[in-house]
Image (spheres, grey):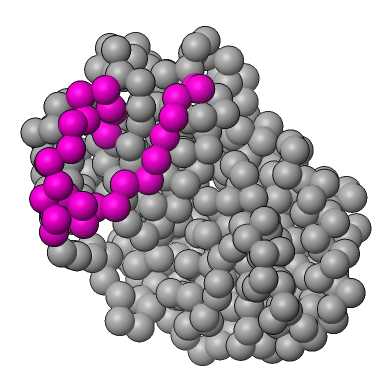
C-alpha cells in the first residue's frame, strides 16, 4: 500500500476517493460561503439580470443556476456564449447585469477574458472557483471560493457539486427573502453521505456496459444534472450520449428510441416536472428502451426498470447531491469497460479554449 496520501490505495481509483469526499467538501463550502451572502447582495445592488459564463461541467452547474435564479430569486438569467466576448468582441452594455464566471481551476483563459470583458461593459462581476488567488478570482469584484480541496482525477466530481452549492448560495443571496433555503442547506452534507452510500450502482453499470446507445433526459431544476450525467458517461466511459430536456425529446428525437437504446432519466424528488417524467418513462418503456432512473419519487421509480435513489431535499436543493449516484455508476462502468476513470482519453484537468 502506498504511504503517499496523494496516491490511492491499490485497487481504488482517485475518482472513487473524491466522490466519497463530497459530504465534507459540501459542508466546508457551505460553511465558508453562506456568510458571504450580504457581500454578494451588495455587489449586485441595482442590477436586474444575471449572466453565467462557464464551460464543461461548470456550464452544467450554471444550467441549474439559471433555473434557480428565475424560480427562486425572480431574476432573469441567461447562459453566456463566451465567444461573443473572446472572438467577436461585441461591445455590450451590461450595466444592469451581474456576470458570474465559473471555473474549477480559475485558470481557463477564455473564462477569465470573458469576465474582464463583462467588467469593461459595466457589469458587476462574481467568480466561483476552487482555487483562491487564481486569475479568475483576481479578475472579479468578489470571488466565492469552493472548499473541495485538490481534485486529482480528471472527471469533476466534488468540484462540480461544490460549484452547484456555491451557485445556490449566490442565487439565494439575491432572492427577495434570502435565507429561506437555510434548512435545506443544513441537510445537504448528510444527504450527500446518503448518496455516497447508495446501493444499485453496479446493476446500472452492468446494463450500460451492454449498449453503445444512451440517451439522458430530465427537465427543470434537475436538467443541469441530466447534462452532467451525460457528460460524465461521454468523457469517462467513451459512450456517446445525448442529453435532452424531455420537452425537446418529445419534439422529434423520441423517434430514434428503441430497444437498442438505454434511456437514463434524472428527476428531482418533487416539483412540477416529476409527473411528466413518470409519463415519459412509461412511453419509453413501451418502445422497448430500458429505462434507468436516478432520483424521483416512488411513482417515478415504479415507472423505471432500474433506479437509484435520490436525496430527501427540496427540488431547489436536490441538484447539490443528485449527481453523486451517477458519478458512482460512471466510475464502476469505466472499470467494467477496462478504462481508467482517473485519466480519460484525450482529457486534461484544465482545458484551454479560444
Total numbered badges shown on the rendered structure: 0
Q: Is residue 224 left or right of residue 117?
A: right
Classify residue 162 by image quadrant.
top left
Q: Could you tell me which residue is drawn at 69 percent across and 88 percent down? A: 210
Does 89 sit above or below residue 49? Answer: below
Q: On the picture, is 88 further left or further right than 198?
A: left
Q: Which residues are magenta?
A: 73-99
In this orientation, does residue 304 appear?
no
Asked which quadrant contains residue 135, the reply is top left
Going 82% across and 46% down the picture, which residue do you hit?
A: 275
The chief SS type of the magenta part is loop
Residue 163 in the image: state x and y as whole percent. Answer: 40, 42
Q: What residue sits 58% from the left and 51% below the top?
A: 223
Indicate whether 306 appears above or below 11: above
Q: In the rendered image, is residue 141 in sight?
A: yes
* Front in this rendered view, residue 100 or 311: 100
Asked if residue 267 lies left or right of residue 353, the reply is right
Where residue 313 appears, x then y in whole percent? 68, 34
Quarter holding the N terminus?
bottom left
Q: Is residue 313 magenta?
A: no
Q: Is 85 included in the stretch rendered in magenta?
A: yes
Q: Residue at x 44, y 29 (%)?
A: 76
Above or below, 261 relative to 56: below
Q: Is residue 29 above or below residue 148?
A: above
12 vs 234, nearest the viewer: 234
| Place of residue 117 in the rendered image (x, y in percent of width and height, measured from the top left) | 12, 41
Q: Quadrant of the C terminus?
A: bottom left
Residue 255 lies, in percent from the top left, at 72, 78
Amino acid at each position: 500500500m502506498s504511504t503517499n496520501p496523494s496516491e490511492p490505495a491499490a485497487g481504488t481509483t482517485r475518482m472513487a476517493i473524491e466522490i466519497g469526499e463530497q459530504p465534507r467538501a459540501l459542508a466546508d463550502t457551505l460553511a465558508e460561503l453562506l456568510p458571504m451572502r450580504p457581500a454578494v447582495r451588495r455587489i449586485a445592488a441595482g442590477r436586474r439580470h444575471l449572466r453565467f459564463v462557464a464551460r464543461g461541467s461548470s456550464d452544467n452547474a450554471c444550467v441549474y443556476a439559471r433555473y434557480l435564479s428565475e424560480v427562486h430569486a425572480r431574476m432573469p438569467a441567461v447562459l453566456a456564449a463566451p465567444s461573443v466576448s473572446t472572438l467577436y468582441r461585441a461591445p455590450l452594455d451590461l450595466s444592469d447585469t451581474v456576470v458570474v464566471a465559473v471555473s474549477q481551476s480559475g485558470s481557463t483563459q477564455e473564462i477569465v477574458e470573458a469576465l474582464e470583458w463583462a467588467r469593461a461593459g459595466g457589469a458587476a462581476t462574481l467568480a466561483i472557483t476552487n482555487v483562491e488567488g487564481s486569475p479568475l478570482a483576481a479578475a472579479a469584484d468578489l470571488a466565492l471560493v469552493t472548499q473541495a480541496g485538490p481534485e486529482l482525477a480528471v472527471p469533476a466530481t466534488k468540484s462540480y457539486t461544490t460549484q452547484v452549492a456555491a451557485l445556490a448560495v449566490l442565487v439565494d443571496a439575491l432572492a427577495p427573502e434570502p435565507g429561506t433555503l437555510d434548512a435545506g442547506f443544513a441537510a445537504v452534507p448528510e444527504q450527500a453521505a446518503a448518496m455516497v452510500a447508495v446501493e444499485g450502482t453496479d446493476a446500472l453499470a452492468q446494463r450500460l456496459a451492454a449498449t453503445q446507445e444512451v440517451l439522458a433526459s430530465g427537465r427543470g431544476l434537475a436538467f443541469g444534472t441530466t447534462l452532467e450525467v451525460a457528460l460524465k458517461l461521454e468523457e469517462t466511459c467513451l459512450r456517446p450520449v445525448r442529453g435532452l430536456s424531455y420537452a425537446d425529446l418529445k419534439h422529434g428525437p423520441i423517434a430514434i428510441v428503441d430497444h437498442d437504446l438505454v434511456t437514463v432519466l434524472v428527476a428531482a424528488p418533487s416539483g412540477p416536472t416529476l409527473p411528466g417524467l413518470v409519463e415519459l418513462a412509461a412511453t419509453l418503456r413501451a418502445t422497448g428502451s430500458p429505462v434507468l432512473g436516478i432520483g424521483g419519487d416512488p411513482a417515478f421509480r415504479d415507472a423505471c426498470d432500474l433506479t437509484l435513489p435520490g436525496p430527501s431535499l427540496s427540488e431547489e436543493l436536490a441538484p447539490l447531491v443528485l449527481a453523486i449516484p451517477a458519478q458512482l455508476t460512471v466510475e464502476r462502468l469505466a472499470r467494467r469497460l477496462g478504462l481508467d476513470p482517473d485519466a480519460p482519453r484525450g482529457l486534461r484537468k484544465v482545458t484551454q479554449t479560444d
